[in-house]
Image: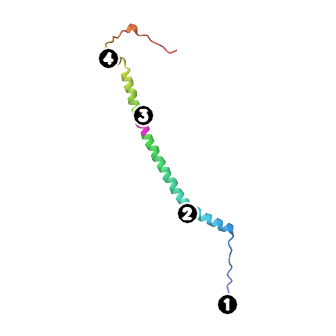
Amino acid sequence: MRKKKVKKVVKISKFEKLLYTLAIVLGLFSPISIVFSKATLSQINFEVEQKKQAIATQEKNNDGLAMTIDELASLTKIQSVAQEEGLSYNNANIKVVQDR
């Protein structure tokens, strides 16, 4: 005579079902969120590099403009413009203003 195997039915509680469901959802959602966050980070890094290049270009432009200002404010340039306009350079009429 054979013994009949008695199968035990294991009942899963609602809390366990909830835990299993959450584990499955997190298992599926984690890789997707990681890929999304890395893609977002790459996009932000790309934008940062673009801004750095724009800043470097603007700084070069500013340096060039500063050199142009220095050239135009030089004494020889001022004297040449004054002579073109018919003005004369008289050193006695120049007054020095000093900052305290």
- In space, the residues marked 4 and 3 are separated at their CA atoms by 30 Å
What kind of element bears circle 4?
helix
The earlier-in-sequence mark between 2 and 1 is 1
Crowding around mark 3 (Cα neighbors within 10 Å: few <14, some 14 to 19, many 20+) is few
Which mark is nearer the camera, 1 or 4? 4
Give yes or no for contact between labels 1 and 3 (Cβ–Cβ under 8 Å). no
Residue found at x 38% / y 9%: 91
The earlier-in-sequence mark between 4 and 2 is 2
Q: Quadrant of residue 77?
A: top left
Q: Quadrant of residue 75?
A: top left
Magenta region, mostly helix, strand or loop? helix
The earlier-in-sequence mark between 4 and 3 is 3
What kind of element bears circle 2?
helix
The earlier-in-sequence mark between 1 and 4 is 1
Question: Pointer 2: what residue?
Answer: 28
Q: Which residues are magenta?
A: 54-59
Which mark is nearer the camera, 1 or 3? 3
The earlier-in-sequence mark between 1 and 3 is 1
Residue found at x 62% / y 66%: 21
Position of residue 93 relative to residue 47, above or below, is above
Amino acid type for the residue under numbered disc 2: Leu
- In space, the residues marked 4 and 2 are separated at their CA atoms by 77 Å
Which mark is nearer the camera, 4 or 3? 4
User: For residue 58: magenta?
Assistant: yes
Amino acid type for the residue under numbered disc 1: Arg
The earlier-in-sequence mark between 2 and 3 is 2
Residues 86 and 6: in front is 86
Question: Pointer 1: what residue?
Answer: 2
Residue 56 is left or right of residue 36, and the answer is left
Crowding around mark 1 (Cα neighbors within 10 Å: few <14, some 14 to 19, many 20+) is few
